[in-house]
Amino acid sequence: MSQPATGVIAPGTLWRTEDPDEATNILSTVYAPHSLTAKGGGPFSFSLQTAHSQELMVGFNRFGSEVRIDVPPPSRFTLSATAPTAR
């Protein structure tokens, strides 16, 4: 998969990767600068599906392993997310 150009994500795009650095690049392009660290011993996987309207972009992220995401404080918006865990 090729890496997205900074600031350019087409509506309805589905991104998939098994590379944590590429996932960091995608998240930073879509949302804000991120630092992503894969945790645990299993294989890493990431997918992002986007949908757009004139005023809003929505993204559904899925990680196939445990991750840590560090994000600097937002300057113009707040993102609230809940990550359920099945045990």
Image (cartoon, grey):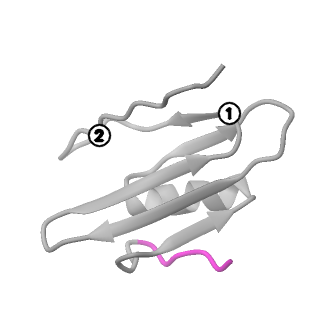
Query: 36 or 14: which is nearer to us?
Result: 14
Q: Which residue is mark 1?
A: 66
Q: Is residue 63 left or right of residue 60?
A: right
In the image, what residue type sits under mark 1? Glu
Q: Which residue is mark 2?
A: 79
Q: Which residues are magenta?
A: 1-6
Query: 76 or 63: which is nearer to us?
Result: 63
Q: Is residue 1 left or right of residue 42?
A: left
Q: Is residue 78 left or right of residue 23?
A: left
Q: Looking at the picture, how far across and down is residue 25, in whole percent?
A: 56, 61
Q: Determine the secondary structure under disc 2.
A: loop
Q: Is residue 82 magenta?
A: no
Q: Residue at x 40, y 30 (%)?
A: 82
Q: Residue at x 38, y 52 (%)?
A: 32
Quadrant where the C terminus is found in the figure: top right
- Taken as a whole, is the magenta stretch helix, strand or loop? loop
Task: Look at the picture and state if 48 lies above or below 66.
Answer: below
The 10 Å Cα crowd at callout 2, few under 14, some 14 to 19, many 20 or more, is few
Quadrant where the N terminus is found in the figure: bottom right
Q: Determine the secondary structure under disc 1.
A: loop
Query: 1 or 62: which is nearer to us?
Result: 62
Q: Residue at x 39, y 66 (%)?
A: 50
Q: Residue furthest top?
A: 87
Q: Residue at x 76, y 48 (%)?
A: 44
Task: Look at the picture and state if 57 lies above or below 85.
Answer: below
